[in-house]
C-alpha cells in the first residue's frame, strides 16, 4: 500500500499511459500549421510595422538631441571666440586711446609751457619797459625837482638878500 491508501500497482503509471500522454504533448494537426503561419506573419510584419518605425523614431530623437547638444556646444565655442575677439579689440582700443590721451596730454603740456614761456617773456618785457619808464620818469622828476629846487633856491636867496 502506498502512503495515500492506494495499492502500489495503481499508483505507478503504466507504460501504455505514458505513450498516450507523451503523444498528446505535441499534436501535428492543422492548428499547428495555422499557429506557425501566424507566428511567421508576426515575425515578418511586426518589425516592419512596429519595431522599425519605433527604432527610427528613437534614433531620430537621439540624433536631434545629440545634434542640439552639439549645436549648443558649437554656439558656446563661437560665443567664447567672439567674446575673446571683442575683449582683445577692446583692449587694443583702450591702449590706443590711452596712448592718444598721453600724446594729447603731452602736447597740451607743451603748448601750456610755451604759452607760459611766452607770457613770461611778454611780462618780463613789459616789466622791463615799465621799470625803464619809471627810471626815466624818476630821472625826469629829479631833473624837474632839481630845476624847481634851483629856482626856489634863487627865490630864497633873493628874499634873503632883499630882506
Image: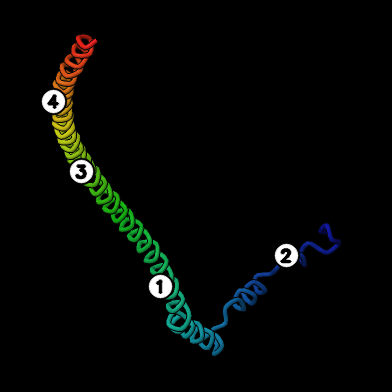
| Foreground residue among 9 and 116 | 116
User: Residue 69's spot in the image, x, y percent?
Assistant: 39, 62
Q: Earlier in the sequence, mark 2 or mark 1?
A: 2
User: Residue 24's spot in the image, x, y percent?
Assistant: 62, 78
User: Mark 3 near mark 2, Cβ–Cβ under 8 Å?
Assistant: no
Based on the displayed image, in which of its 4 quarters is residue 118 positioned? top left
Of circles 4 and 2, which is in front? 4
Per the image, the residue denoted by label 2 is 12
Distance of mark 1 from mark 3, alpha carbons? 64 Å
- Secondary structure found at label 2: loop
**Residue at position x 46%, y 76% in the image:** 54
Q: Earlier in the sequence, mark 1 or mark 4?
A: 1
Based on the displayed image, in which of its 4 quarters is residue 44 positioned? bottom left
Q: Which mark is residue 142?
A: none
Asked if residue 89 is positioned above or below residue 30 in the image, the reply reads: above
Q: Earlier in the sequence, mark 3 or mark 2?
A: 2
User: Mark 1 near mark 3, Cβ–Cβ under 8 Å?
Assistant: no
**With 6 as the anchor, is 28 left or right in this view?**
left
Q: Earlier in the sequence, mark 1 or mark 3?
A: 1
Of circles 3 and 2, which is in front? 3
Asked if residue 32 is positioned above or below residue 161 in the image, the reply reads: below
**Residue at position x 19%, y 13% in the image:** 158
Of circles 2 and 1, which is in front? 1
Q: Which mark is residue 104?
A: 3
- Secondary structure found at label 3: helix
Distance of mark 4 from mark 2, alpha carbons? 165 Å
Per the image, the residue denoted by label 1 is 60
User: Residue 16's spot in the image, x, y percent?
Assistant: 65, 74
**Residue at position x 17%, y 19% in the image:** 151
Distance of mark 1 from mark 4, alpha carbons? 110 Å
Of circles 1 and 4, which is in front? 4
Amino acid at each position: 500500500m502506498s502512503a495515500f491508501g492506494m495499492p502500489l500497482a495503481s499508483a505507478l503509471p503504466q507504460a501504455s499511459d505514458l505513450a498516450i500522454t507523451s503523444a498528446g504533448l505535441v499534436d501535428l494537426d492543422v492548428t499547428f500549421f495555422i499557429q506557425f503561419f501566424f507566428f511567421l506573419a508576426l515575425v515578418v510584419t511586426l518589425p516592419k510595422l512596429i519595431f522599425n518605425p519605433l527604432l527610427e523614431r528613437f534614433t531620430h530623437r537621439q540624433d536631434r538631441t545629440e545634434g542640439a547638444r552639439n549645436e549648443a556646444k558649437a554656439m558656446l565655442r563661437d560665443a567664447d571666440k567672439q567674446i575673446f575677439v571683442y575683449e582683445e579689440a577692446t583692449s587694443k582700443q583702450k591702449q590706443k586711446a590711452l596712448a592718444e590721451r598721453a600724446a594729447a596730454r603731452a602736447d597740451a603740456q607743451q603748448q601750456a609751457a610755451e604759452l607760459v614761456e611766452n607770457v613770461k617773456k611778454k611780462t618780463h618785457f613789459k616789466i622791463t619797459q615799465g621799470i625803464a619808464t619809471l627810471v626815466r620818469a624818476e630821472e625826469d622828476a629829479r631833473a624837474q625837482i632839481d630845476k624847481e629846487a634851483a629856482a626856489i633856491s634863487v627865490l630864497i636867496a633873493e628874499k634873503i638878500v632883499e630882506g
